[in-house]
Image (spheres, rainbow, N blue to C red):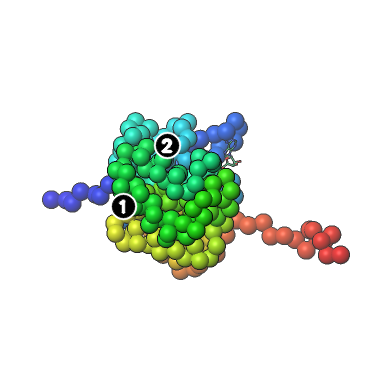
Amino acid sequence: MTTPTPTPALRLIGLSKAFGDKRAVDHVDLEVPGGSFFGLVGPNGAGKTTSLSMAVGLLRPDSGRAEIFGVDVWADPVRAKELIGVLPDSLGMPERLTGREVLTYLGLLRGMEPEAVAKRSQELLEVLELDRADSTLVLEYSTGMRKKIGLATALLHAPKLLILDEPLEAVDPVSAATIKVILQRFVAAGGSVVFSSHVMPVVEQLCDHVAVVTGGRVVASGPLDEVRGGSTLENRFVDLVGGQPVSAGELSWLAS
Ligand SMILES: Nc1ncnc2c1ncn2[C@@H]1O[C@H](COP(=O)(O)OP(=O)(O)OP(=O)(O)O)[C@@H](O)[C@H]1O
């Protein structure tokens, strides 16, 4: 008897999206195993945000499908969205509320018990050190604080899969360390994380799986050690993506 293959936490099947003539995402197939810490890397404009937006039901694909634990994101969005916590790239957030009010509002909107919302909100605000800014409106938050409240909203309902677009960008080192611990604990407790990042050492530190995306296509994907193939992820990334070295004559006007 063969053991059934476990359902992937996230599966993208032939996902494509064009903006006018620009093929932002071009037949992307990707499998994120359940329980994995999965890094999505790629140069600026590679299609990471567009892929993740389609994966979580924020952007409708031109073709292809996305499944969260086997649930089709576009056929059964309510069920799929119960399973995920999302930190999008552009944080559309109620601006005229405090962090606590945002969490309360979203928690109640998701049908959580008021006591649980209050307790979890307090813990999240404390851990992410946002409790000190309890009377500050999101409107007045710094970029890093916005990331942190975005992450808190993604965690609040204890999802099975976190999908995070550059969660550590613009976050101070102390908060970044806290966020890394939260995410590592989440995975150790059986959760799955997919996150995009430009910081290769962070991906190497946290992830067990990685995918490299460029020009809207996945050019490498799998366990971290397999993808980096005995080199560093940064070297492998440059090999796969190709760099444009700055020649000696370029920008010579900068040296005055
Ligand atoms: N709403 C949009 N309208 C037009 N073009 C878009 C739109 N969103 C993305 N694009 C284009 O699609 C391509 C992929 O963009 P995307 O934001 O997915 O890249 P990314 O890998 O997340 O980049 P970065 O690392 O810079 O955040 C880019 O060429 C971008 O200009």
Residue drawn at the location 67% of the way across and 56% of the way down: 244
The image position of residue 78, as x and y in percent, is 33, 34
> In the rendering, at what x and y percent does residue 42 appear?
54, 52
Instruction: Tell me the SS state at disc 2.
Output: loop
Dot 1 falls on a residue whose secondary structure is loop
Which of the two labelled residues, at mark 2 and mark 1, occupies the earlier sequence position?
Answer: 1
Residue plotted at (46% across, 32% down): 60
Q: Is residue 75 at least partly visible in the picture?
A: yes
Q: In the picture, which quadrant includes the C terminus?
A: bottom right
Left or right of 85 in this view: 189 = left
Q: Amino acid at mark 2?
A: Gly
Q: Amino acid at mark 1?
A: Gly
Which residue, given by chain and number where applicable, does mark 1 sit on? 34
Q: Pointer 2: residues within 10 angstroms few (<14), some, or many (20+)?
A: some
- Dividing the picture into quadrants, the one containing residue 184 is bottom left
Q: Is residue 186 left or right of residue 45?
A: left
Q: In the rendered structure, find residue 110 and report the number of the disc placed on it.
A: none
Cα distance in 3D space between marks 2 and 1:
19 Å
Name the residue tied to disc 2: 57
Q: Between 142 and 236, which is closer to the camera in this rendering?
A: 142
Cβ of mark 1 under 8 A from ligand 1: no
* In the image, farthest residue toward the front: 135
| As drawn, 196 above or below 14 | below
